Amino acid sequence: MKKSALVIINPSSGKEKATEYEELIRETIQDTYSEITVKHTEGEGDAIRFAKEAAENNYDFVISLGGDGTVNETVNGLAPFSNPPKLGIIPMGTVNDLARSLNIPMKHEDAIKLLDSGTETKIDIGMINNETYFTNILGIGRAAKAIHNVDSEEKSKIGPLAYLKVIGKEIMDERLFPIKFEMEESTWKGDVSVVLISLIDSLGGVKTIVNDVDNGDGNFHIFAFKHLNLIELAKMTPSVVMGNLKESENVHYFKTRQVSITTSASETQESDIDGEQGPNLPFDLKVLPQHITIMSN
Ligand SMILES: Nc1ncnc2c1ncn2[C@@H]1O[C@H](COP(=O)(O)OP(=O)(O)OP(=O)(O)O)[C@@H](O)[C@H]1O
């Protein structure tokens, strides 16, 4: 049967090298996909639109070339469909959290090979208020934003400590906010400094920071930090380096498929989704278990 693939390229990603790989992708998948369409994004929202059109037109495969922002947009185009096309990722950004968590090689030629010879892996998708989707991490609180702005050169030099440094700057002026989690299993409320809700085991490009999260286990992993001041950060460093953050005394940890998150009426809390600005609280979060199939390693 004739199969069709759409290649979405963000030409601005990865030092503008994305378009160079167009031909190699065609050669790699043309035996399986007789109809290959290539579309280049020009700005925000294009990758969402292209992926949505592909799903509406019953494409079999959508390939996303770009950083986490482009992949997140592609997923937002595919996720509303009950049986979306398979997804391929060629990581071209600086962080590439989802690709790292799926062992997709950072070397582009190797990642392209997987489009044909990789293993199909089903991943969970997080759904916010029935309209926004994420694959990696949702952050709430000021320090959450800082995490995604960690310098990539520093990350490769000093690993997870690069995060502590950036967060350290942000928390000189720590401000706690009230939060309430209403889960299927229980309700919890308290004052926190920052909340991270993860679907994957890689955070900001460092794969070990949350090392017991299995992408595809059907759960959100919620880390609510009581404090992010310098003393607590110093105490937490071993847990962060070892990837067992949930054992830290400074962290309230919850694992759940579904959660409503609210703050007090007088608070406005912004969020950060997969490295991009997300909506403000309140949230109704649901996991769509193993909803998207990705070619991985
Ligand atoms: N042709 C284009 N020129 C400039 N920007 C674009 C273009 N197409 C899409 N964009 C923008 O690129 C952003 C996504 O970039 P993405 O995160 O994928 O790559 P990156 O910034 O290289 O990666 P990273 O964030 O990992 O460093 C989106 O905000 C989108 O608006």
Image (tube, grey):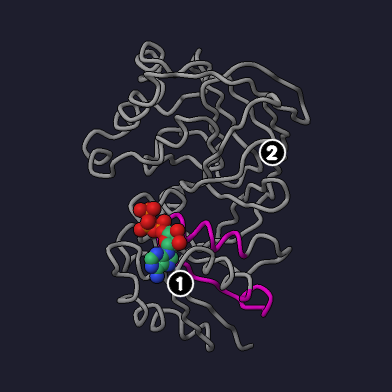
What is the distance, in whole Å, between disc 2 and disc 1 at their CAs? 29 Å
Location of the N terminus by quadrant is bottom right
Q: Which residue is mark 1?
A: 41
Report the span colored magenta.
53-77
| Image quadrant in which you'd find residue 45 | bottom right
State the residue lying farthest toward the right.
184
**Picture coordinates of residue 225, whole percent (x, y):** 52, 21
Q: How many marks?
A: 2
Q: Quadrant of residue 151?
A: top left
Q: Amino acid at mark 1?
A: Thr
Say whether residue 121 is left or right of residue 275.
Answer: right
Q: Nearer the viewer, residue 161 or 262?
A: 262
Image quarter for residue 215?
A: top right
Regarding residue 107, the answer to whether it shows in the image is yes
Q: Judge from the rendering whether residue 157 lies leftward or rightward of residue 72; answer left or right.
A: left
Q: Which residue is mark 2?
A: 283
Secondary structure of the residue carrying tag 1 is loop
Q: Is residue 45 left or right of residue 217?
A: left
